[in-house]
Image (tube, coloured by chain):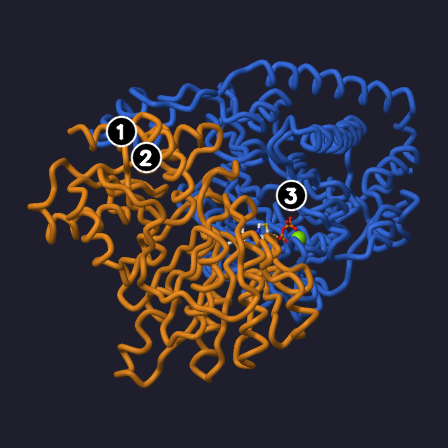
Chain colours: A blue, B orange
């Protein structure tokens, strides 16, 4: 049965070293905890989203292994963090993602076609073949261009949030990053500015335990990442990152306060990076595989499924239908993406500036006059 | 003599120097137990322990800032920046601190830190795993800039860099990290910093290059040679201090110059080379100096082969310059 009631309040600050969770491993709402109200339809849409990320990751990782895709990054086991954040926002809010939250883009309406074209860097790639796979950008969804340099998006999100306040709008910023990013100067600078300017910004730290081969213990000597909020004068919440309902509760509260002018929040979602850092990584070289098995038992999608079962929303038929729809859509997107050629060579000189300056016009002519590589396509 | 690739040669140099000199320490992201994302520090953690091979938190400013502090106290840090593209958070520490410490303290505080970092494109890495930022560092007084093109030079130059008294930016050409193989003596040897090397003798055109571009230029030279051209190729090896003598001697002989680098053209290292040659050997020149470089755009992903100077582009420049 769905537990009714108001979202849990994180203000006044909870103990940032204690993990907040709503669902137990069987998908029951824990005793004495009030769960947020998520309508049936949304529950199912969230389930479909979680499933989509899982299926897409599995398929595209295989594709990379077959040499059909240059590079890929999966987020297996962290899917709930994408949707818990995305769910609490409205469309006019902005998100500043890192490279490991495809669900955030999907939830806001990013199509599998755009997603796949970006991976292939082809002539329909929304970012025109400029960036490596998984570095999406979708301005029409207020999903800001992903950058590889870790942490750079953090102060930018704060700036956007400040701009919203200055413009007397009540839009908020949601910025995602890994726990590794909390070691950068960008994180501390961003947190400090947000505190000082009371920026309507939610800092979402996906603590997945690893930054490539560097374990969480080597990033910080503090007990949690959430506790870092206190030094910047904002609440910090540590939430079970595999418990979608708990993330939704925490996020709804943080967004509500941000919108009401009550300032920023740091959310640490405790989860685990079950796969390698990227398709270039072999995690067995530095970590014990039994650690992975323990987290597999905590699967966020399975927990959400069990919760839906308790709410009489889930059925095998429904699951199969979703899986089939997603697979069909993915295969169509893939077929389309693989059939397309690269962006035109001359497009390399676009978007450096608003208009092509004379020196680039010269270089463009020089480039087109050749000699040029035989296969114009970078090849995959 | 063992045959090594560049990664193995770097690894060998680090191990050798860490054994020889207890002041040498390595630090950076993932350099410890894992041995670095390119495995250049592989095995060092097990051999020398966590005090001398440190996995750091993810913060380049911290890596270089603490390396400076260690050097001030008398250690010889060899930090690794995982990709040259991620060196910018440490830019302030490098450019305002590391480069100027000796000078601003009136010679009291030398900071012999050797920053190793893989650079360059051709690995399908897009903007942020492909850049060639050498010019920023050459432009900063107080930094030496070294870029080897092959395993033998990598070991000898790295040993010189670590044994020197000055900060060095040691940029490793990641595109040929594994592809460039060669015999590397097991024992100790050094290659002096500031010495270029003629890697192909020729009479007609002087081709100046460094790092991964040396391989592109060798290929270009083969193509041009097949059509009867005879370029001379100089692997600069050290960008600062530059071996002007070797360059000028060749230019006086050939009277023609082609410069190749991956970095964008405007204010790239080629601009400095061209200016130096114009200042000192203008009257020997029989053709305009030609530059084959990356374009003045950010480094693209899909079109990287269009962006990077190819053997064909270099060969064309050789032929045009030779027949000018
Ligand atoms: C400034 C910077 N330094 C180094 C890197 C190389 N790098 C890419 S991802 C990564 C680890 C990031 O870990 P974390 O922030 O925990 O995110 P996760 O990958 O776990 O999602 C590193 C070191 C980078 N991209 N940017
Ligand atoms: Mg992480």
Looking at the picture, tell me which residue is in the foreground, A376 or A188: A376
C-alpha distance separating marks 3 and 1: 34 Å
Rendered-image quadrant of the N terminus of chain A? top right
Q: Is residue B190 visible?
A: yes
Q: Residues within 10 Å of mark 1 (few under 14, many from 20)?
A: some
Q: Position of B20 compared to B265: left or right?
A: right
Protein chain holding label 3:
A
Q: Which residue occupies 46% across, 43% down? A: B130
Q: Which residue occupies 59% across, 35% down? A: A134
Protein chain holding label 2:
B
Mark 1 secondary-structure assignment:
helix
Protein chain holding label 1:
A
Number of marks in picture: 3
Q: Earlier in the sequence, mark 3 or mark 1?
A: 3
**Residue B28, which numbered label?**
none
C-alpha distance separating marks 3 and 2: 28 Å
Mark 3 secondary-structure assignment:
loop
């Amino acid at each position: 049965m769905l537990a009714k009631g108001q979202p849990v309040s994180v203000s006044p600050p909870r103990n940032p070293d204690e993990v907040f969770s709503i669902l137990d491993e069987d998908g029951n709402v824990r005793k004495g905890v009030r769960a947020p109200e998520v309508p049936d339809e949304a529950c199912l849409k969230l389930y479909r989203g979680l499933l989509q990320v899982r299926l897409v990751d599995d398929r595209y990782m295989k594709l990379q292994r077959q040499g059909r895709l240059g590079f890929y990054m999966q987020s297996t086991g962290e899917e709930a963090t994408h949707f818990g954040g995305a769910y609490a926002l409205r469309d006019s809010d902005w998100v500043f993602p890192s490279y490991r939250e495809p669900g955030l883009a999907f939830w806001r309406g990013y199509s599998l076609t755009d997603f796949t074209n970006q991976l292939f860097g082809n002539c329909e790639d929304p970012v025109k073949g400029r960036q490596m796979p998984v570095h999406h950008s979708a301005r029409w969804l207020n999903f800001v261009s992903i950058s590889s340099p870790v942490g750079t998006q953090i102060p930018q999100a704060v700036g956007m949030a400040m701009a919203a306040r200055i413009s007397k709008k009540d839009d908020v910023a949601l910025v995602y990053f890994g726990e590794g990013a909390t070691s950068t100067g960008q994180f501390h600078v961003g947190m400090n500015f947000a505190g000082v300017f009371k920026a309507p910004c939610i800092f979402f730290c996906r603590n997945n335990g690893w930054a490539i081969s560097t374990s969480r213990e080597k990033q910080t000597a503090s007990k949690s990442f959430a506790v870092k909020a206190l030094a910047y004068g904002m609440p910090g919440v540590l939430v079970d990152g595999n418990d979608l309902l708990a993330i939704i509760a925490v996020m709804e509260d943080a967004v509500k306060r941000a919108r009401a002018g009550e300032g920023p929040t740091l959310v640490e979602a405790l989860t685990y990076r079950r796969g390698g850092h990227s398709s270039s990584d072999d995690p067995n070289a530095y970590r014990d595989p039994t650690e992975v098995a323990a987290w597999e038992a905590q699967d966020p999608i399975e927990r959400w499924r069990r919760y839906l079962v308790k709410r009489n929303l889930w059925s095998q038929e429904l699951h199969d239908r979703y899986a089939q729809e997603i697979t069909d859509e993915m295969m169509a997107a893939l077929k389309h993406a693989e059939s397309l050629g690269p962006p035109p060579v001359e497009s390399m000189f676009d978007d450096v500036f608003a208009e092509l300056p004379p020196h680039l016009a010269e270089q463009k002519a020089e480039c087109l006059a050749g000699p040029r590589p035989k296969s114009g396509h970078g090849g995959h | 003599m063992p045959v090594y690739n560049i990664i193995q040669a770097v690894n060998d140099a680090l191990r050798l120097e860490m054994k020889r000199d207890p002041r040498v320490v390595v630090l950076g992201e993932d350099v410890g137990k894992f041995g670095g994302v390119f495995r250049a520090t592989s095995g060092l953690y097990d051999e020398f322990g966590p005090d001398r091979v440190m996995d750091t938190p993810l913060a380049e400013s911290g890596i270089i800032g603490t390396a400076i502090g260690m050097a001030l106290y008398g250690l010889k840090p060899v930090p690794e920046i995982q990709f040259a593209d991620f060196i910018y958070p440490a830019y302030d520490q490098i450019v305002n601190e590391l480069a100027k410490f000796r000078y601003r303290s009136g010679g009291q505080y030398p900071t012999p830190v050797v920053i190793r970092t893989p650079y360059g494109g051709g690995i399908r890495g897009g903007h942020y795993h492909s850049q060639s930022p050498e010019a920023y560092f050459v432009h900063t007084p107080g930094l030496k800039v070294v870029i080897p093109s092959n395993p033998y030079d990598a070991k000898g130059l790295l040993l010189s860099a670590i044994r020197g008294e000055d900060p060095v930016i040691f940029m490793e050409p990641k595109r040929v990290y594994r592809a460039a193989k060669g015999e590397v003596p097991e024992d100790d040897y050094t290659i002096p910093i500031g010495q270029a090397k003629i890697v192909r003798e020729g009479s007609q055109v002087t081709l100046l290059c460094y790092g991964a571009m040396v391989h592109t230029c060798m290929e270009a030279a083969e193509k041009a040679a097949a059509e009867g051209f005879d370029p001379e190729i100089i692997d600069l090896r050290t960008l600062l201090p530059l071996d002007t003598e070797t360059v000028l001697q060749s230019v006086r002989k050939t009277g023609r110059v082609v410069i190749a680098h991956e970095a964008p053209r405007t204010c790239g290292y080629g601009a400095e080379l061209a200016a130096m040659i114009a200042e000192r050997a203008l009257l020997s020149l029989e053709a305009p100096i030609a530059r084959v470089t990356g374009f003045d755009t950010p480094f693209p992903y899909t079109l990287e082969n269009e962006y990077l100077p190819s053997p064909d582009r270099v060969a064309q420049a050789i032929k045009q310059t030779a027949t000018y």
